[in-house]
Amino acid sequence: MYDYFYGQQAELFSFYRVPKVLFTDEKFSNISSDSKLLYGIMLDRMNLSAKNGWVDELGRVYIIFTIEEIKCALGCAEKKAVKMWLDRTQTYWTGEAQLYLCKKLCG
């Protein structure tokens, strides 16, 4: 038997935020749901990077998120993790590991 949430119990959990536009705008229809979820996970990491002062010389916040971290976060194999990495059409990266999320997507 399953129990239910009562009162403010739902606030005991933390959640990933995934921009609604990824599901409602036609231009993102070719991106897989897993890649959209990955974007939300990376957006969460972006908050941590901002708090830690991970900013480049232009003032842009960046994250470091490896294929191994994608595999772990989504419980998937390397082939799928690489596909999602390449599917991130609204992100770009420079150098070896700095990844910037495109703010334009969110608004």
Image (spheres, rainbow, N blue to C red):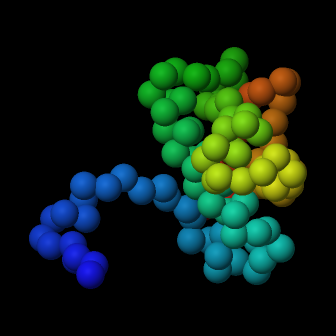
Q: Judge left or right: residue 106 versus residue 33.
A: left
Q: In the displayed structure, would residue 88 be above or below residue 63?
A: below
Q: Quadrant of residue 28?
A: bottom right
Which residue is at a point 52% across and 21% down the rendered structure image? Answer: 53
Q: Position of residue 42 (x, y in %)?
A: 61, 45
Which residue is at a point 81% across and 36% down the rendered structure image? Answer: 93
Q: In the displayed structure, would residue 101 be above or below residue 97?
A: below
Which residue is at a point 83% across and 73% down the rendered structure image? Answer: 30
Outermost top residue: 57
Q: Position of residue 69 (x, y in %)?
A: 67, 38
Do we see residue 73 in this rendering? yes
Q: In the displayed structure, would residue 99 be above or below residue 38?
A: above
Which residue is at a point 52% across and 45% down the rendered structure image? Answer: 44
Q: Judge left or right: residue 38 versus residue 43.
A: right
What is the quadrant of the C terminus in the image?
A: bottom right
Do we see residue 104 in this rendering? no
Q: Position of residue 43 (x, y in %)?
A: 57, 47
Q: Quadrant of residue 65?
A: top right
What is the quadrant of the N terminus in the image?
A: bottom left
